[in-house]
């Protein structure tokens, strides 16, 4: 289990390694309540929030006894691998990244450009994760989970601490897209007692929603436009426990709503994000989440590793 203390410790550890991403005030006194902010985390190193958790995992291991010469191994649909590869290059150790065979070509190319060794295994994240776990055990490399390790979740939680500071503690509700749940877990722990967190999931990838209904993490089938970044087949144990403890609410959005929200972010704000990222805004646009009068809401835009060509009108 992680708490706000873990997020604060992570913030001190990774200071200077990650960007303090800006917050945009996009709607003051508008239809969604007295305030609406976008946390522009898609501007983070490697294009997603994942750099926070990756640095905290590696630097924490270095403090505890040093990083192995074999480096670090991870499994990822793309963004976590990019972050781990980047963090490893910054601290001077090799990185090996296992990805599904259907991982977006743009992400695979970026992994190789950073210097990571890329191994493509299976059709789903779970298969890549199994292979990566075995590889780490066989070689002695440090295994970095994409979303279900305390150091990873605590690192992601530094985003929540930043957001509280940047909104002068005025934010009431934070909308976050959820796949495996590492970002949600970290932020919910970091802001517990100060703001509510709403987990937004595609109807085609409802890992947290199903877990909360079942009372435990369960496997789900995943598909849809956001499955490349939100396609974990089971929510993390840490995410489930933090969500249960802190009262995180899960709402579901359709693929059509996600596509519309992503298009709106481009058309209105000239922001290019992944489909998975757009899910958080889709909850507001579609009415899956309806703020109370005067409620102050922040939407986390968490990733930008996408092919933008479909946003440009022919």
Image: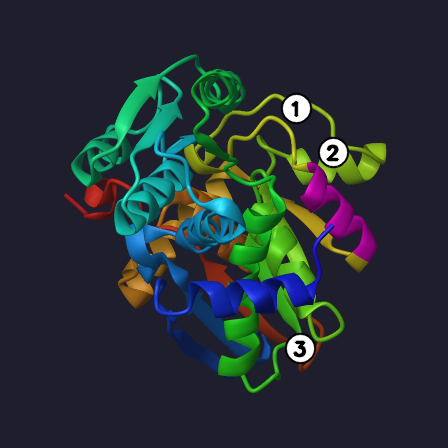
User: Earlier along the polypeptide chain: callout 2 or callout 3?
Assistant: 2
The residue identified by callout 1 is 220
Q: Do the residues labelled 1 and 3 touch (CB within 8 Å)?
A: no
Numbered tag placed on residue 210 in the rendering: 2
> Which residues fall within the magenta stretch?
237-245
Q: Are marks 2 and 3 in contact (CB under 8 Å)?
A: no
Q: Is disc 3 placed on a helix, strand or loop? A: loop
Q: Do the residues labelled 2 and 1 touch (CB within 8 Å)?
A: yes
Is residue 228 shown above or below 8? above
Res 287 seen here: no
**In-image side of 72 versus 182 (left or right):** left
Q: Distance between the residues labelled 1 and 3?
A: 33 Å
Numbered tag placed on residue 66 in the rendering: none
Q: Quadrant of residue 212?
A: top right
Q: In which quarter of the image is residue 270?
A: bottom left
Please name the residue shown 56% across and 52% down the image. Answer: 183
User: Earlier along the polypeptide chain: callout 2 or callout 1?
Assistant: 2
User: Earlier along the polypeptide chain: callout 1 or callout 3?
Assistant: 1
Is residue 161 shown above or below 218? below
Mark 3 Cα shell of 10 Å, populated few (<14), some (14-19), many (≥20): some
């Amino acid at each position: 289990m992680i708490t706000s203390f873990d997020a604060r410790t992570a913030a001190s550890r990774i200071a200077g390694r990650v960007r303090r991403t800006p917050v945009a005030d996009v709607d003051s006194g508008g239809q969604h309540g007295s305030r609406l902010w976008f946390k522009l985390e898609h501007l983070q190193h490697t294009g997603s929030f994942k750099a926070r958790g990756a640095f905290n995992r590696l630097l924490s291991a270095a403090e505890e006894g040093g990083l192995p010469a074999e480096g670090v191994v991870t499994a990822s649909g793309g963004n976590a691998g990019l972050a781990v590869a980047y963090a490893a290059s910054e601290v001077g150790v090799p990185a090996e990244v296992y990805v599904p065979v259907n991982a977006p070509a743009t992400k695979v190319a970026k992994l190789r450009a950073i210097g990571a060794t890329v191994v493509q295994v299976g059709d789903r994240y779970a298969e890549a994760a199994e292979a990566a776990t075995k590889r780490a055990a066989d070689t002695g490399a440090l295994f970095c989970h994409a979303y279900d390790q305390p150091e990873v979740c605590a690192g992601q939680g530094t985003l929540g601490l930043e957001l509280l500071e940047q909104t002068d503690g005025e934010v009431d509700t934070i909308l976050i897209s959820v796949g495996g749940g590492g970002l949600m877990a970290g932020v919910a722990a970091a802001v517990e007692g100060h703001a509510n967190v709403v987990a937004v999931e595609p109807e085609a990838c409802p890992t947290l929603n199903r877990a909360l209904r079942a009372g435990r993490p369960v496997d789900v089938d995943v598909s849809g436009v956001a499955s490349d970044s939100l396609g974990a087949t089971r929510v993390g144990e840490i995410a489930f426990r933090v969500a249960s403890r802190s009262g995180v609410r899960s709402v579901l959005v359709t693929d059509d709503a996600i596509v519309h929200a992503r298009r709106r972010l481009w058309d209105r704000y000239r922001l290019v994000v992944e489909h998975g990222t757009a899910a958080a805004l889709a909850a507001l646009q579609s009415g899956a989440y309806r703020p109370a009068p005067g409620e102050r809401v922040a939407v986390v835009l968490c990733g930008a590793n996408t092919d933008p060509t479909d946003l440009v009108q022919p």
